[in-house]
Image: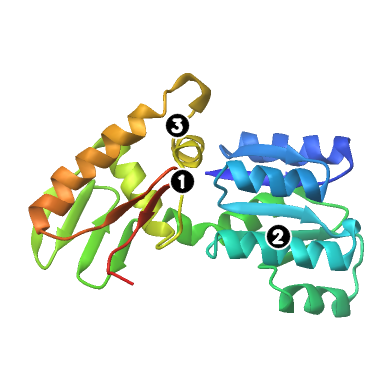
């Protein structure tokens, strides 16, 4: 899973990222809100950690921007402000968690784990369609089909963000350990496998190609 750390203090940003990397999370570091928005445009993230010191107005607008792009994304705000009033206001404005400084990195990692627990689910159920992670199996109205390897990971990632357009580059960043060493053609191969092993077998449409933009999970139809 990939996380975005938005913190202007370079030392603290590096420490947060190091702690998360040691917990087996992939991270990108942004030092301004502008840079963070750029990262959101080119990569897919499961969670964002953002410092409240950028200012309430700018942070709240950024949270709204992030959740408009990826409705299921989690946002943790870190802050020097220990007041209950600020914590309540931040949560009401869309943040999923609020952690006060100075940071305890064990606590931060735990809160990240808790926030992402849903993203590590073993099973996704969408009406009659069931995607079982551990078995790399797809079930539709009692009928089963198996989708292996990266094709299954692509399918499950798209299913987590229904009706959201996700580019090839975002899929590469989200799933491959070293996306820069992989050509975007592997996504086309994965999509073809999904259509052969899922759509053709069950006679349904699950993945829609959005020309020049990417793909979106479209089951059931909007």
- In the picture of the structure, the residue carrying the numbered disc 2 is 76
> Foreground: 36 or 3?
36
Residue annotated with mark 1:
213
Choose top left, top right, bottom left or bottom right for residue 131: bottom left
Instruction: Identify which residue is drawn at 26% across, 55% down.
Output: 132
For marks 1 and 2, the one nearer the N-term is: 2
Reading the image, the residue beneath label 3 is 176
Q: Secondary structure at mark 1?
A: loop
Pick out the residue farthest to the front.
211
Q: Quadrant of the C terminus?
A: bottom left
* Extreme residue toward the top, this view: 181
Residue at the spot 54% in from the left edge and 46% down from the top edge: 44
Does 196 appear above or below 172? below
Q: Does dot 2 land on a helix, a strand or a loop?
A: strand
Query: Residue 144, relative to residue 43: is it above or below?
Result: below
Disc 1/disc 2 C-alpha distance (Å): 29 Å
Q: Residue 88: give x, y in percent of width and height.
A: 79, 79
């Amino acid at each position: 899973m990939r996380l975005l750390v938005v913190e202007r203090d370079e030392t603290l940003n590096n420490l947060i990222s190091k702690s998360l990397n040691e917990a087996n999370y992939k991270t990108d570091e942004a030092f301004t809100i502008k840079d963070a928005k750029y990262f959101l445009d080119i990569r897919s993230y499961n969670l964002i950690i953002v410092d409240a010191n950028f200012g309430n107005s700018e942070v709240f607008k950024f949270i709204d921007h992030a959740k408009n792009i990826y409705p299921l994304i989690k946002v943790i705000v870190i802050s020097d402000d220990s007041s209950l009033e600020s914590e309540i206001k931040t949560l009401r404005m869309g943040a999923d968690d609020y952690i006060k400084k100075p940071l305890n990195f064990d606590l931060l990692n735990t809160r990240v784990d808790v926030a992402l627990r849903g993203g590590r689910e073993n099973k996704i159920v969408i009406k009659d369609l069931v995607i079982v992670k551990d078995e790399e199996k797809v079930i539709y109205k009692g009928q089963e089909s198996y989708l292996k390897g990266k094709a299954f990971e692509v399918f499950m990632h798209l299913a987590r963000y229904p009706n959201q357009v996700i580019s090839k580059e975002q899929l590469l960043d989200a799933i491959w350990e070293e996306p820069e060493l992989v050509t975007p053609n592997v996504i086309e191969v994965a999509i073809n496998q999904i259509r052969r092993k899922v759509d053709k077998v069950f006679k349904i449409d699950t993945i829609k190609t959005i020309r020049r933009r990417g793909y979106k999970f479209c089951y059931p139809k909007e």
